[in-house]
Amino acid sequence: MKKRPLCITALVWVAVVWLLGKVGVPGFGHGSPDFPDGEARESALVAGTVYKSELNEKQTVLYLKQTILIKQANLTAVQQEYPFDRIKVRIKNQKSGVNIGVGDRVLVRGDLEEIPIPGNPGQFHERAYYYARKVKWYQKGRSIQVLEKEYDAILGFQEKIKKALGIGLHKAFSKEKAGIMEAMLLGSKENMEKEIDFLFQILGCSHILAVSGLHLSVLGGGLFRLLRKCSVPLWGAAGISAFSMFFYGGVTGNGASVLRASIMFAVYMGSFILKRTYDLLSAVSLAVILLLCESPCYLYDSSFLLSFGAVFGIGVVYPGLFGKETGKRGKQGKKEVFFRLFREGFRSGISVWFVILPLILYFFFQIPLWGSVASVFFLPLSPMLLISGAAAGIGGRFLAADIGRILGLPASGILEILLGIGEFMKALPGALWTAGQPEIECCIFYYAAAIWFLWRRGGYTTKIVYGIALAFLLVPCPKGGLEVTFLDVGQGDCACVQTEEGHCYLIDGGSTTVSKVGRYRILPFLKASGIRKIQGIFVSHMDADHVNGIKELLEMTVSKESGIKIERLFLSQCSETAEQNRELEALGKKAGCEVVYIKKGSRIKDRDLEICCIGPGQVYEDSNESSQVLHVSQKGFDILFTGDVEGMGEEKVLEELREMNITWEVLKVAHHGSANSTGEEFLQYVKPEKAVISCGKENSYGHPHKELLKRLKKYSGQILLTKEQGAVHIIVKNPAFSGK
């Protein structure tokens, strides 16, 4: 390390950035962004330069930099301008009214919102992702105007190059394969089907779909060799290649892995010009320092950590596992060269997985069991895939479509093989094995133990065996009791009950304010919890805020996308929603579920856990009155789930409660805290220690109602709201329990 001062500097800088983030220094963590005192966030006026744009059928999404917040007290006042953070703007297409391109200077009026912090375990950390990219605000645009077209000429030119190459790819490949190549080469997934993305996850090749260091090393190295063969001087070839990669990075969006690779490639080219030895660890240390200076929040970004982890695997773990090659290779035939490259690619794949496994599990909670093995065989094919794809895009756009197709034949063939293997693996058990999110402490211990095993005596086979054994450190420990989690799903309901044995039951799952709540809130929580099987899903009634997320889970189970098996679906009869019941029943059966209609008195027994239906006692016409009311109990711990029950349904449940001599520890308050449910007489019999209300922030219904809160304060010990606290987690470790 003494010979590598940049390595020591990088380690110190990482520690400093982490400590500054921990103590809450602005810019080094995920605290709320600064906003001028006295300014209103509603209808704010912001000017900025568009550096990225996304367009769909309903809205335009713009990313603005060089941003200023404009204050104008009245029509005659002089405008005041405040330097401002980067913004992500959403505006309906009919309101934009103008053609807006990358590089344009625009003026937007709309409401500013802080980027939220995730409310549930496993939920995507929007703030961490966008803060790393210096985006600190969302703006819901009401109006927009262009102040200056192509204010930033470089950004505009990069966008034109991107569009031109996209056109070339669509001329050279089929629609499906063109979408894949756009993702690989241009960092754009708008035209790639979700099913294809899923297949690449199964293959363990998702990194191919993101423009990364692999892409730049292949394309940049290829360009350098081409220029040298064209007799371009060394300094010229190196300089042009380095500049081209930085420019190409801008075309693809300058992600963390692209910036890392661009810096390292520039250092590599510089070593040629200066006739110095290239040191990979020093180059990667320089990249760490520069990127964390540019944006300290990269330290918490998954793409940053995975990119540098992969380089560490190749630069440090590879020699530690397999040793360094010594001596001269001598003259080798094509066959020997092929097998040597394949062997090196295979070993590199093992070395990379050795490092990134904890990161993969921590951020994504699952691994492709078969794909993690197969990907090391696919890695050597990546250079041919990228070079052929790039040549096809250039040829298809600037020469002729037929030339593009010919140049793209190798890429097309490789993609055909990969997709075929992906379809085969998709049908295999454990295609995507859900392991759950390991604790930070387990990850740290893994790396500490890995360092010790890596450099202890023994052959690399022994070290690999030790490495596999280390992976078991990342497997979550068995649960110590009953766990009940009321998820933050916005304006809706979803609760997860997990037994000590790891069995799982869902009670409702839907939202009217969170889009695709099943995919982006419920499923990530299940994966982070290591849940691979749901023993039963209870649907209290058919309102969208209770069932639309469940429908998504069932649909993803049908397509084998979720990786989770659902055994039973528990429904109840209601004349108002009979048709919806039949549709959900059909979907459940298609997903392989046993569909059971339960009624008052129905009991589900799972060892010490018992779930008893105490309502509805009859089939009501109204959906809320027919809502399931469930009594969940384990060893004297009792929870009452009331769905949206009200009116006659609540009265009938109250009759049951009068006959029950139970001390209720937890009440899931009915109908998100509406004024017409959970009446005073009802609460007199329940008197819960904790009352949980599931509702969304600033919901249009005014939930929870102030009258309901007044009643709860009178009869309950503690009131917990998902809109304020995020997910409410109840842990039952007999005889005591706690809620957070």
Image: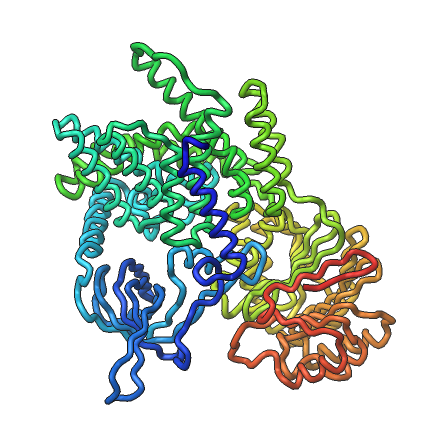
Position of residue 431 in the picture relative to residue 190 (left or right):
right
Give the image quarter of residue 586: bottom right
Considering only vertical position in the picture, is 90 above or below 355? Answer: below
Residue 471 is situated, as x and y percent measured from the top left of the image, at 60, 35
Return the residue nearer the eye: 130 or 456: 456
Return the residue nearer the eye: 266 or 223: 266
Quadrant holding the C terminus: bottom right
Looking at the image, the residue that sits furthest to the front is 2
Return the residue nearer the eye: 633 or 111: 111
Position of residue 52 in the picture relative to residue 422 (left or right):
left
Considering only vertical position in the picture, is 335 above or below 605? Answer: above
Q: Which residue does the image show at 38% across and 17% down from the upper left? A: 339
Report whether residue 475 is seen: yes
Q: Which residue does the image show at 32% across and 73% down from the upper left? A: 82
Give the image quarter of residue 633: bottom right
Marks counted in the figure total 0
Considering only vertical position in the picture, is 717 above or below 160? Answer: below
Residue 727 is situated, as x and y percent measured from the top left of the image, at 61, 63
Q: Which residue does the image show at 55% across and 46% down from the upper left? A: 362
Residue 583 is situated, as x and y percent measured from the top left of the image, at 55, 61
Residue 264 is situated, as x and y percent measured from the top left of the image, at 33, 38
Position of residue 680 in the picture relative to residue 565 (left or right):
right
Report whether residue 577 is seen: no
